């Protein structure tokens, strides 16, 4: 069974200065876009993060300050990247928890609203962990019977992720062979914010942390409006603040 695409599926892999969505920055992005006819397009960029790359991060991905000192900033390439993945569903490895939130955060920092509304988000790691519980290199070895050479190169990892998903579709008929069926299988087709500060329960957005955990967001905003100000001033990702504002605006519209 082959994966069937109704629109392009863009596999994204990022290398960064660290893993803090709010504070760290992208140093490399690779996108492998698979078109419905099976053709591929690749875009790879080194990016100057405008901050020092910690040695621990360089030890993982091999990218140093010297390598990116003449590279463009994210602001300089943001529109090009956005246009490349316009009208695409998005795939990746642990992408729903890291790569996509990090990318959205970078877009928001430069004033670009990159929405995932209407897109399917295929996290290959989610399928893998539900089925086999391993890492990307092990997944590549397990599904593709090949050793992953050059792991932590963004383009290598993004391409390997695409190959792993193709092999998963072949191996697990229960996940289906469409982006829609895979996202439904992994249960990640209804994300509110990528930091999971909010989740949906029976179609209602509720808090997923703190003293209001389990309470509807709209209820808290009505009963304790200062909580909105506290979150907006707090150390939350911009994507979380954006979604909170959207919920607040909807609540105010209903009042009107």
Image (cartoon, grey):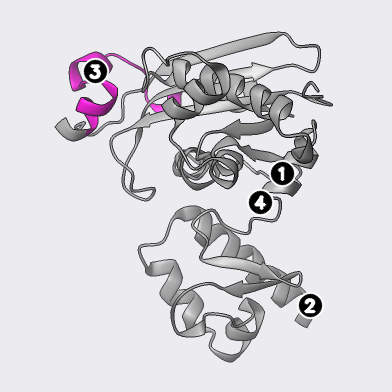
First along the sequence among labels 2 and 3: 3
Q: Are marks 1 and 4 in contact (CB under 8 Å)?
A: yes
Mark 1 and mark 2: span between their CA atoms? 31 Å
Say if residue 256 shows up in the picture: no
Residue appearing at x 54%, y 39% in the figure: 125
Circle 3 residue: 69
Residue appearing at x 63%, y 21% in the figure: 84
Mark 1 and mark 4: span between their CA atoms? 6 Å
For the magenta stretch, what is the residue range? 57-79
Circle 2 residue: 254
First along the sequence among labels 2 and 4: 4
For label 3, the SS is loop
Q: Are marks 2 and 3 in contact (CB under 8 Å)?
A: no
Q: Position of residue 131 (x, y in %)?
A: 59, 42
Few, some or many residues within 10 Å of mark 1 (<14, 14–19, 20+)? many
Q: Nearer the viewer, mark 1 or mark 3?
A: 1
For label 1, the SS is helix
First along the sequence among labels 1 and 2: 1
Q: Nearer the viewer, mark 2 or mark 4?
A: 4
Q: Are marks 2 and 4 in contact (CB under 8 Å)?
A: no
């Amino acid at each position: 069974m082959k994966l069937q695409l109704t629109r392009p599926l863009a596999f994204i892999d990022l290398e960064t200065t660290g893993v803090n969505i709010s504070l760290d920055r992208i140093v490399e992005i690779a996108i492998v876009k698979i078109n419905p006819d099976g053709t591929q397009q690749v875009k790879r960029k080194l990016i100057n993060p405008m901050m020092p790359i910690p040695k621990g991060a360089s030890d993982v991905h091999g990218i140093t300050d010297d390598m990116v000192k003449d590279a463009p900033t994210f602001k300089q390439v943001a529109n090009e990247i956005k246009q490349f993945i316009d009208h695409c569903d998005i795939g990746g490895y642990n992408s729903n928890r890291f790569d996509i939130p990090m990318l959205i955060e970078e877009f928001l920092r430069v004033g670009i609203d990159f929405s995932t509304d209407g897109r399917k988000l295929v996290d290959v790691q989610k399928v893998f962990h539900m089925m086999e519980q391993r890492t990307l290199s092990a997944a590549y070895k397990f599904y593709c019977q090949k050793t992953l050479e050059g792991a932590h190169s963004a383009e290598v990892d993004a391409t390997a992720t695409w190959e792993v998903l193709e092999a998963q579709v072949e191996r697990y008929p229960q996940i289906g062979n469409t982006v829609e069926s895979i996202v439904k299988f992994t249960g990640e087709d209804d994300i509110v914010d990528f930091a999971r500060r909010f989740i949906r329960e029976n179609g209602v957005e509720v808090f997923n942390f703190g003293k209001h955990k389990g309470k509807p967001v709209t209820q808290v905003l009505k009963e304790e409006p200062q909580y909105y100000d506290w979150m907006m001033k707090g150390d939350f990702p911009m994507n979380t603040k954006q979604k909170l504002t959207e919920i607040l605006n909807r609540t105010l519209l209903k009042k009107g």
